[in-house]
Image (tube, coloured by chain):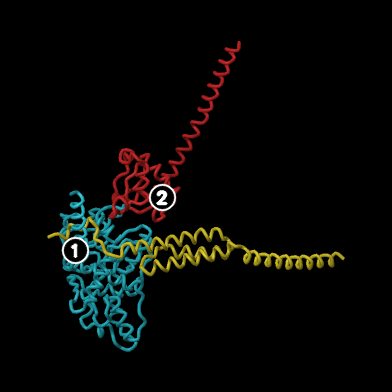
């Protein structure tokens, strides 16, 4: 009797775990699809990547921008959308700033501290 | 009777206010000090302000000398806003500056800059 | 009246900017030399190949002590072995470089056929590929041994980079290198010039900023920080990371053009590689 009881309990537990797991998983998937933040995170990350590429196209990419985007992607995967969005926004801003920095110097300007050494 | 009562009440009121101030003043000073401490930490940290890379600052070890020593800052910047602007984007005052554009290029957050400015201005 | 004067001044300034931005390579070099002479009047020209130790007396003593038993010596020896060992097809580097191994002063140069600046590491790999060998990596590893041997054999040669006039693309490459040198980049917004021209000799924390004149004479260099010898382009990469810019590819166009410009600036100085640094 005792033995059967134990086995039964074990089976019941296993069943409950499987069911519970299944439910939780389904809920997780639903939450992901339904969470408007998931879509927002994907969008912001995409924009950050575009900004990074634009900066790179004028040799103006900063050191950590790609790292931030990579990390934002990982955060979004874990469902940490707020953190992902925050980081992706930072990366996007870096891309924009790096682009501006490069484009604003399109024309070579010899700095004032060196100018005078060209005379005579 | 009424008069002395009023007087008493007044005196009590003044005392209460004074006591209140006594209680408040040390608290505010402590808060100010810890804010300055935070600013100092940010200024000295290599990953944040790293002011010591280029500037001598009292209390900081092995400072660089690319920029001027940070002393008598209130005399040099009577207007705190001007000092903040210099730290936020030094290229506005001098396009050939070798100073990092801490605000414009987001090396520090706005809050961090405020703390650093408070600290530097206290020097 | 005031307005007229102001616009005249503005015009003159604009003229000045255009003039210096379009200066000839020789004018650039003259300005460079004049600038450093002015900044370090006590330092003779022939000292610049010693880099920061030309201007840092304390650092120099330590450096001279290190140079008594040079840390790059084993790399020279292993480089000589590489140079002499035949490829699988029986040929050697000597077949590619008949004047070798003392060939460092021939680089970098403009290659009209390829339409690009060719550096010594690039030429070495061209030779390997032509002989069916795998190319070597451009920052770390055995290319440094080979370069160390060639540098050692080339010691004393004078830098004499030319910008051939029969191909306008050569001057273009030089101008791109010059533009790179003066362009601010990275989150910290520094150009090469910010540190190594404007502030050469000043201290960042305890580090003294080296002058650009002589920057290219002593590669590959054994850096204590690396614990080994590394290439010039590895150093470029590190510099760019320091200013929080994404580094460019070693031996890519940007760094090759920068090397072309920098080496031209050092024309007349003697090669003294391999080097050793803190």
Residue pointed to by mark 2: B45
The crowd level at tag 1 (other Cα within 10 Å; few <14, some 14-19, many 20+) is: some
Tell me how many marks there are: 2
Task: Please give the name of the residue rendered at 49% of the width and 59% of the height, measured from the top-left corner.
Answer: A87
Task: Please give the name of the residue rendered at 79% of the width and 68% of the height, measured from the top-left corner.
Answer: A11
> Is C93 displayed left or right of C15 in the figure?
right
Name, please, the residue furthest toward the left. A120
Task: Please give the name of the residue rendered at 25% of the width and 53% of the height, measured from the top-left corner.
Answer: C58
Secondary structure beneath label 1? helix
Instruction: Give how far across and how far down residue B104 sits, in percent.
Output: 39, 54
**3D distance between C-alphas at marks 2 and 1:** 42 Å
Camera-nearest residue between C155 and B40: B40
What is the quadrant of the N terminus of chain A in the image? bottom right
Instruction: Give how far across and how far down residue C133 sits, in percent.
Output: 35, 84
Q: Which chain is cyan?
A: C
Q: What colour do you see for chain A?
A: yellow
Residue pointed to by mark 1: C19
- Badge nearest the viewer, 2 or 1: 1
Q: Chain of mark 2?
A: B
Instruction: Give how far across and how far down residue B51 sits, in percent.
Output: 36, 49
């Amino acid at each position: 009797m005792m033995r059967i009881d134990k086995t039964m309990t074990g089976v019941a537990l296993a069943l409950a775990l499987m069911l519970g797991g299944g439910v939780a998983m389904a809920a997780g998937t639903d939450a992901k699809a339904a969470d408007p933040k998931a879509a927002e995170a994907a969008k912001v990350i995409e924009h950050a990547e575009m900004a990074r590429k634009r900066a790179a196209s004028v040799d103006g990419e900063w050191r950590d921008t790609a790292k931030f985007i990579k990390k934002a992607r990982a955060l979004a995967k874990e469902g940490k959308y707020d953190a992902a969005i925050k980081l992706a926004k930072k990366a996007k801003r870096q891309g924009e700033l790096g682009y501006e920095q490069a484009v604003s110097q399109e024309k070579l300007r010899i700095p004032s501290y060196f100018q005078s050494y060209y005379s005579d | 009777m009424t008069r002395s009562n009023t007087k008493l009440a007044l005196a009590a009121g003044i005392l209460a206010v004074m006591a209140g101030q006594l209680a408040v003043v040390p608290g505010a000073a402590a808060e100010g000090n810890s804010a300055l401490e935070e600013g100092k930490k940010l200024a000295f940290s290599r990953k944040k302000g790293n002011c010591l890379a280029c500037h001598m600052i009292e209390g900081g070890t092995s400072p660089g000398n690319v920029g001027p020593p940070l002393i008598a800052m209130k005399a040099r910047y009577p207007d705190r806003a001007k000092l903040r602007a210099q730290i936020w984007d030094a290229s506005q005052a001098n396009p050939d500056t070798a100073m990092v554009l801490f605000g414009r290029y987001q090396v520090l957050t706005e809050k961090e800059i405020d703390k650093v400015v408070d600290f530097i201005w206290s020097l | 009246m005031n307005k007229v004067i102001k616009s005249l001044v503005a015009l003159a300034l604009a003229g000045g900017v255009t003039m210096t931005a379009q200066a000839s390579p020789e004018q650039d070099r003259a300005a460079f030399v004049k600038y450093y002479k002015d900044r370090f009047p006590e330092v003779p020209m022939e000292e610049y190949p010693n880099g920061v130790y030309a201007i840092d007396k304390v650092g120099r003593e330590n450096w001279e002590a290190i140079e008594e038993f040079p840390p790059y010596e084993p790399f020279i020896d292993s480089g000589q072995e590489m140079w002499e060992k035949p490829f699988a097809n029986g040929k050697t580097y000597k077949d590619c470089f008949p004047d070798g191994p003392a060939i460092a002063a021939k680089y970098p140069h403009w290659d009209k056929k390829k339409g690009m600046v060719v550096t010594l590491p690039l030429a070495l790999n061209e030779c390997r590929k032509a002989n069916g060998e795998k190319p070597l990596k451009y920052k770390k590893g055995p290319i440094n041994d080979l370069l160390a041997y060639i540098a050692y054999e080339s010691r004393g040669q004078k830098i004499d980079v030319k910008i051939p006039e029969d191909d306008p693309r050569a001057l273009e490459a030089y101008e791109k290198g010059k533009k790179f040198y003066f362009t601010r980049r990275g989150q910290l917004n520094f150009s090469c010039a910010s540190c190594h021209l404007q502030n050469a000799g000043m201290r960042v924390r305890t580090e003294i900023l080296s002058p650009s004149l002589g920057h290219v004479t002593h590669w590959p260099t054994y850096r204590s920080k690396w614990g080994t010898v590394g290439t010039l382009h590895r150093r470029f990469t590190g510099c760019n990371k320091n200013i929080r810019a994404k580094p460019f590819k070693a031996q890519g166009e940007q760094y090759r053009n920068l090397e072309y410009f920098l080496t031209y600036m050092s024309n007349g100085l003697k090669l003294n590689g391999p080097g050793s640094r803190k």
